Image: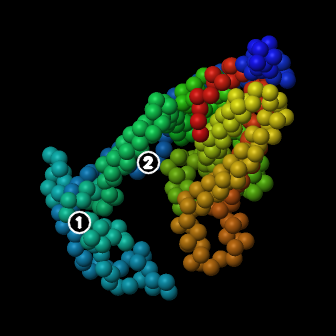
């Protein structure tokens, strides 16, 4: 066949798409949105940065109690006098109960030696064999009273550190440099939480404002660090920010409509007391702060997945327009919605399992159980995150379809570094 008779080859790399320059213009708008949000987040962090210690009623301060790591040398059953903690189902307190007496060696110059304490209920000698590292509470002598030692907890630093190291090594081994950058981003995120969010909330700053500023700073840093600076990542970032705004609005509305109260358990009561006179008011914002942070991780996952899916579809079919990319992307998004909603629901159910079992023992009616304070918080938190997730997927897919369809095929193909 003569070369002139051969069919012409399509020049896919030069195809810009049916929207012409719409992709670059949309990309420029996305960059402006991200820059504006980042500047606002930094300004908010600067304005709400905690400047001084908060006066709180912390019993562990001023030398009231020391936490000392010790090593168990012996654990044996003894007979002790019953207390209110040993109350029977009929309300009576037994005269005698079996208790576990633990002997431990305490290192140090002042507190060195062997001490004996009673372990918490539910432990047996097999749970604390010789050599077990435990944390004991030491109450110094004061006001004529002798020094007192009490059981604290197990020393879990070594096993938890080992798990963390294994997680980091496996992440880097499987994901390579991208996994390492993700770990660095995770460290940055927890640094923001520890250095800014928690101290700011304890200092009495508006918890919702603090959570939004911290979340925006975290997501901008983490996404670009883990996935690189590109239009694809920027698209996912804008989708995440939009979903975060939806989750926040839904959390505020849900808390108001459901009349959620900040103090729903003994732990929250104790926290409110430790925070000081305005502790209850601080806890009102802590719930919304938790809603924002809980939605952040899930939104980050689904938005980067949807943006990457649309980029892959555009790279595979240079002639695909906005409508076709959106339709195909949503086929993937619907599957992701179904699986992620289950993830959110069962994550909260797993965390609340002890409360579920307690209510099952009490045989409370289901409707009364689900509408109680503790469960109402979890339901609002779960539904706010789930609704924000469901709406963020089509929104991110639409933005990605507009940007990808109007971007040159060569540029799209060069921006396919992410795999989910």
In front: mark 2 or mark 1?
A: 1
The image's mark for residue 334 is none
Determine the secondary structure under disc 1: loop
Mark sitting earlier along the chain (2/1): 2
Task: Give the residue displayed 83% in from the left and 18% down from the top.
Answer: 20
* Residue 68 visible in this rendered orientation of the protein: yes
Q: Describe residue 244's horizontal placement relative to residue 65 as left or right.
A: right
Measured in 3D between alpha carbons, the distance from the residue under mark 2 to the one under mark 1, in whole angstroms, is 33 Å
> Which of the 4 image quarters holds residue 245?
top right
How many callouts does the rendering have? 2
Q: How is the image coloured?
A: rainbow
Residue 113 at what x, y percent from top left?
14, 55
Above or below — where is 44 with respect to 80? above
Q: Nearer the viewer, residue 239 or 55?
A: 239
Q: Which residue is mark 2?
A: 58
Instruction: Locate the N terminus and report the quarter of the image it occupies.
Output: top right
Task: Give the residue displayed 63% in from the left and 61% down from the top.
Answer: 374
Q: Describe residue 35's horizontal placement relative to residue 129 as left or right.
A: right
Q: Which residue is mark 1?
A: 129
Q: Describe residue 233's horizontal placement relative to residue 25 as left or right.
A: left
Disc 2 packing (10 Å; few <14; some 14–19; many ≥20): few
* Residue farthest toward the front in the current orientation of the protein: 1
Residue 54 at what x, y percent from top left?
50, 38
Task: Give the residue displayed 53% in from the left and 67% down from the top.
Answer: 354
Q: Nearer the viewer, residue 136 or 215?
A: 215
Above or below — where is 75 with respect to 45? below
Disc 1 packing (10 Å; few <14; some 14–19; many ≥20): some
Q: Describe residue 242's horizontal placement relative to residue 117 as left or right.
A: right
Determine the secondary structure under disc 2: loop
């Amino acid at each position: 066949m003569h070369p002139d008779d051969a069919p012409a080859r399509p020049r896919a790399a030069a195809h810009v798409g049916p929207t012409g320059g719409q992709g670059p213009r949309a990309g420029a708008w996305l960059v402006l949105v991200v820059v504006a949000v980042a500047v606002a987040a930094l300004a908010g962090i600067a304005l709400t940065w905690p400047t001084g210690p908060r006066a709180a009623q912390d019993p562990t301060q001023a030398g009231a109690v020391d936490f000392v790591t010790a090593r168990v040398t012996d654990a044996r059953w003894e007979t002790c006098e019953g207390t209110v903690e040993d109350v029977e189902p009929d309300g009576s307190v037994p005269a005698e109960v079996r208790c576990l007496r633990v002997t431990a060696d305490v290192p140090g110059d002042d507190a060195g030696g062997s001490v004996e304490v009673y372990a918490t209920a539910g432990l047996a000698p097999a749970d604390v064999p010789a050599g077990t590292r435990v944390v004991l509470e030491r109450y110094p002598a004061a006001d004529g009273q002798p020094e007192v030692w009490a059981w604290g907890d197990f020393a879990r630093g070594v096993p938890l550190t080992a798990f963390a190291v294994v997680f980091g090594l496996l992440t880097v081994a499987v994901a390579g440099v991208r996994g390492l950058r993700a770990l660095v981003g995770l460290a940055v995120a927890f640094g923001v939480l520890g250095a800014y969010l928690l101290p700011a909330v304890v200092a009495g700053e508006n918890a919702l404002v603090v959570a939004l500023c911290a979340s925006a700073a975290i997501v901008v840093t983490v996404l670009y660090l883990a996935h690189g600076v590109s239009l694809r990542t920027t698209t996912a970032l804008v989708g995440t920010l939009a979903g975060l705004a939806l989750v926040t609005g839904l959390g505020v509305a849900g808390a108001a409509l459901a009349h959620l109260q900040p103090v729903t358990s003994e732990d929250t009561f104790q926290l409110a007391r430790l925070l000081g006179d305005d502790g209850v008011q601080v806890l009102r914002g802590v719930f919304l702060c938790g809603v924002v942070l809980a939605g952040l991780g899930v939104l980050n996952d689904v938005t980067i997945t949807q943006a990457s899916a649309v980029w892959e579809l555009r790279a595979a079919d240079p002639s695909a327009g906005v409508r076709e990319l959106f339709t195909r992307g949503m086929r993937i998004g619907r599957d992701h919605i179904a699986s992620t909603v289950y993830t959110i629901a069962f994550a909260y159910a797993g965390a609340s399992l002890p409360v579920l079992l307690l209510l099952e023992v009490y045989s409370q009616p289901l409707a009364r159980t689900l509408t109680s304070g503790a469960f109402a918080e979890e339901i609002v938190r779960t539904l706010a995150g789930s609704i924000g997730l469901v709406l963020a997927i089509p929104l991110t897919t639409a933005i990605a379809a507009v940007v990808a369809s109007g971007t040159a095929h060569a540029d799209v193909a060069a921006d396919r570094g992410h795999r989910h």
